[in-house]
Amino acid sequence: MKYTIMKYTIPRAALFLAAAVAGCQAAVAGPNVLIAQKGVGAPYGSRDPYTCSSKTFPKSGPITAAMARQYVICDAEEGDGSTRQIWLLEDVTVDVGRGVVTHYITKADQDPNGKVYALRGSLKQYLCSKVQHGEFENAGKNCALWHETGATGKCYRTTFGDWKCSMNALDTLQIGGQPPPKN
């Protein structure tokens, strides 16, 4: 059986192959583990920060850029609504280098038999304070922003099998009075 799309004829097997390739690419990228902490961003006039439902994918082998990006976000975003400030990331891009076995531990929870993966990329990091009204009105300008275009970092697996990923750029300037990120 053949299907005609516009003026090109595509064999049915080719359509199945294309669907299979797309499915494999999605499986390699990994699941979406980011979960918004509902309502936490409201006091800051921002979107809700993310946490991760799980930090164990992939169970073996190297970490993908898509999973490293998610873990960077949920390791960096902080705030439960009870504090005066909240940390949020936006526009996060991540490249993952090849894994390197280290013969020393740089973090107490690092798996000494696992590989460490170098990260590079960019992100926007926001530090937002709670919205105030009245004499000290700050709505819409209650965040500091750092454009971290040359960010570097690493991902490693802990002795419990969780991934920890972080990335930052230490040479960026803070821009105050910025609006918070929204959904």
Image: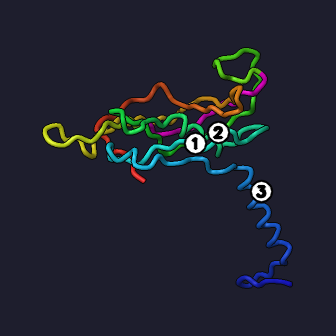
Q: Position of residue 147 (x, y in %)?
A: 44, 37
Report the disc number at residue 55: 2
Foreground mark, 3 or 2, reads 2
* Element under disc 2: loop
Left-right relation of 146 to 158: left
Measured Cα–Cα span from mark 2 to mark 1: 7 Å
Q: Nearer the viewer, residue 36 or 95?
A: 36
Marks 2/1 in contact by CB < 8 Å: the verdict is: yes
**Which amino acid is tagged 2?**
Lys
Residue occupying image coordinates x 67% and y 37%? 96
Residue 1 picture quarter? bottom right
Residue 76 in the image: above or below residue 38: above
Check the image and report above or below for 91 versus 96: below
SS state under label 3 = helix
Q: CA distance from mark 1 to mark 3?
A: 23 Å
Q: Amino acid at mark 3?
A: Cys
Which residue: 43% across, 29% down? 172
**What is the number of the mark on residue 24?**
3
The residue that label 1 is drawn on is 52
Amino acid on which the number 1 mark rests in the picture: Cys
**Percent x, y of residue 142:** 29, 39
Quadrant for the C terminus, please: bottom left
Residue 162 percent coordinates (x, y): 67, 33
In the rendered image, the vertical position of residue 162 relative to residue 10, given as above or below: above
Q: Could you classify mark 1 by the number of other residues whose Cα lies within 10 Å: few (under 14), some (14-19), or many (20 or more)?
A: some
Q: Are marks 3 and 2 in contact (CB under 8 Å)?
A: no
- Provide the residue span drawn in magenta: 113-125
Residue farthest along the top direction in this orientation: 104
Relative to 136, is 108 above or below? Answer: above
